[in-house]
Image (cartoon, helix red, strand yellow):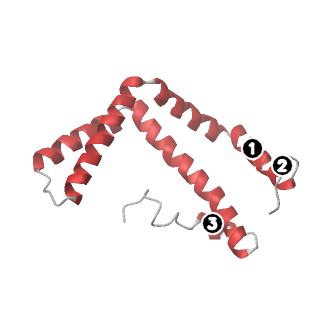
């Protein structure tokens, strides 16, 4: 099996791609929003609580239990409180933007491995990340 060294053209180009990403104003802004979230322990706690509540409701539903209107209302109140917080909403948007960047880069690489050629931009940019990604309602 071939080993790729730090001086390999592939590694050099990958590092150049990463450097280009780091220099993009959009990327810098995403990083700022992610860091703001990481520095706000109250918003993080709110996020954890919301995630735990969602998991509880999903488990209950998977086990055949009925979710009451009260439980739904409570969850929606938690969710609305979270998404309406400026740091939280900026964090969620940053996650979406980061996901899209990652999707596009991975799509180009995956397409090259699978087809042996460089994809046209419309093949990548118009494509979905797939139904298994978990980021869309299907």
| Residue 50: image location, x then y, percent | 30, 39
For the point 70% across and 39% down, the residue is 22
| Residue 100: image location, x then y, percent | 56, 53
Front-lying residue, 97 or 43: 43
- Check whether the beta carbons of the residues at disc 1 and disc 3 lie within 8 A of each other: no
Residue 20, numbered circle: 1
Mark 3–mark 2 distance (CA, rounded to whole Å): 23 Å
Label 2: state its secondary structure.
helix
Residue 124, numbered circle: 3
Q: Earlier in the sequence, mark 2 or mark 1?
A: 2
Label 3: state its secondary structure.
helix
For the point 11% across and 45% down, the residue is 70
Is residue 120 visible in the rendered image? The answer is no
When the figure is inspected, residue 42 is found, relative to residue 134, above or below; the finding is above
Label 1: state its secondary structure.
helix
Residue 12, numbered circle: 2
Mark 1–mark 3 distance (CA, rounded to whole Å): 19 Å
Front-lying residue, 1 or 33: 1
Q: Earlier in the sequence, mark 1 or mark 3?
A: 1
Mark 2–mark 1 distance (CA, rounded to whole Å): 12 Å
Q: Residues within 10 Å of mark 1 (few under 14, many from 20)?
A: few
- Check whether the beta carbons of the residues at disc 3 and disc 2 lie within 8 A of each other: no
Numbered disc total: 3
């Amino acid at each position: 099996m071939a080993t790729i060294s730090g001086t390999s053209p592939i590694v050099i180009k990958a590092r150049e791609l990463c450097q280009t990403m780091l220099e993009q104003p959009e990327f810098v802004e995403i990083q700022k929003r992610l860091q703001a979230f990481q520095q706000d322990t109250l918003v993080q706690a709110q996020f954890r609580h919301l995630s735990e509540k969602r998991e509880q409701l999903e488990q209950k539903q998977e086990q055949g239990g009925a979710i009451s209107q009260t439980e739904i209302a409570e969850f929606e109140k938690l969710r609305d409180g979270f998404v309406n917080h400026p740091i939280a909403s900026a964090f969620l948007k940053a996650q979406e933007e980061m996901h899209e960047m990652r999707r596009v880069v991975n799509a180009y690489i995956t397409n090259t491995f699978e087809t042996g050629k460089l994809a046209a931009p419309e093949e990548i940019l118009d494509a979905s990340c797939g139904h298994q990604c978990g980021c869309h309602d299907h």
